Image (cartoon, helix red, strand yellow):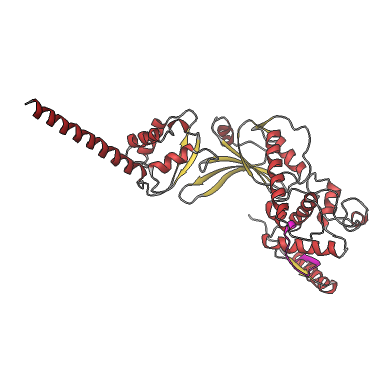
Amino acid sequence: MWRNIASNGLTMLILAFAGIAGLIAWGQNRFIAPGPLAEAICVRVAPGSSMAALSEDLETRGAVTNGWIFRVGADYTERSSKLKAGSFLIPEQASMDEIVTAVTRGGASTCGTEIVYRIGVAKAEIQIREMDPTTGRFSADTKFVPGEGEVPKEYTDLVSQSDTRFRVSTAPGATSWQIVDSLKKADFLSGEISEIPPEGLLAPDSYEIRAGADRAALLAKMQDAQEKRLADAWERRADDLPYDTAEEALIMASIIEKETGVPDERSLVASVFINRLRQGMKLQTDPTVIYGVTKGEGILGRGLRRSELREKTPYNTYVIDGLPPTPIANPGRDAIEAAVNPGESDFVFFVADGTGGHAFAKTLSEHNANVQKWRKLEADRAAEPAEPAAQ
């Protein structure tokens, strides 16, 4: 009798263990299997939130089939305590495991509403933008210039939220003075800026920050990024460049940046300046002269005067030989690459062609013909009747 009881008990125990093992295997499969989402969504995790609260939100929104399995899976993989605050893009059919990874790995938020401070060459503008998770595209319906006009209530409300994400985006070609001046006007930043960083050493990029971030610390981050970019590019430089240091390459990159905004032209523009240096020609580039006039403090807003083109200054490349003493702006990664690995050409001249790009020439006669075409185009445009004002 006791033997039968023991045998039956052992059988039941084996069956129980088998059932538990089956349940675990079933849960593991559900955890890594494709999820039920038909289209991508954006999930916001508030500061201080828990994996339990998140699982309920995900189950309600149809992102997971079982919130309990989601929580157990996060616990089992030891990620429950690593939940990060932010807004995270969850793609369609994302598994529970992939969702846990998205909300615990850290780094920049990948969707949602954010405040972007765009520092450009001509102006600085704050944008409030929202990403459509189904397309991955941002739309910015609210825009304003700090210090000009009324501040939108939407901005004021977002700034007061502790988890609002901010992004400072600096455009290639902006000067260090322009970037510093713009950062001083950003009311979501803190701290003083004791001095303007050296020209050219602030990496144009998009930097995600939190409200109250220190201005000087952000500038230091920009400078570290640019120094690394320059050092990496200089290590991969072409042979026989007509300059000997990375600092000189940065000066060249800044000139390239200011001369063209067309990505495909950068290597050609670089080749023109390289050829001029090799042949002992003067660089003769307007942006350097303009920098000598403005010192990088804003835009000139007018054409260069004849007296400015003739005056001997360290930045007047119509008068001096070689490169100016410093960069004239903060060049982007592509301009730096063009400066250290220029294209191969016989061109020594270029002029605007009216399309946003340039016409290149090997000889002065070819160049003069291109200049005449450009001047005719300018004259034709000036003669065109103005568009009637909208009523």
Between residues 223 and 258, which one lies in front from this camera angle?
Answer: 223
Give how far across and how far down residue 242 sits, in percent: 82, 59
Q: Residue furthest top?
A: 2
Left or right relative to 146: residue 295 = right
Position in image of residue 267 (x %, y %): 72, 62
Q: Vertically, is 373 above or below 389?
A: below
The answer to whether residue 325 of the structure is visible from this angle is: yes
The image quadrant that residue 64 belongs to is: top left
Q: Is residue 340 magenta?
A: yes
Where residue 213 appears, x then y in whole percent? Answer: 64, 32
Which residue is located at x 52 percent, y 37 percent? 106
Q: Residue furthest front?
A: 3
Instruction: Name the residue located 83 percent from the left edge and 57 percent from the top edge.
Output: 286
Count of labels in the image = 0
Q: Quadrant of the N terminus?
A: top left
Q: Is residue 384 visible?
A: no
Is 321 placed above or below 227 here?
Answer: below
Q: Is residue 316 left or right of residue 140?
A: right
Residue 384 belongs to the span the image colors magenta: no
State the image quarter where residue 72 is shown: top left
Q: Position of residue 200 (x, y in %)?
A: 76, 46
In the rendered image, the vertical position of residue 80 relative to residue 122, given as above or below? above
Q: Which residues are magenta?
A: 339-352
Which image quadrant is residue 8 in?
top left
Q: Quadrant of the C terminus?
A: bottom right
Q: Is residue 220 left or right of residue 9?
A: right
Along the viewing direction, whichever of 205 and 359 lies nearer the viewer: 205
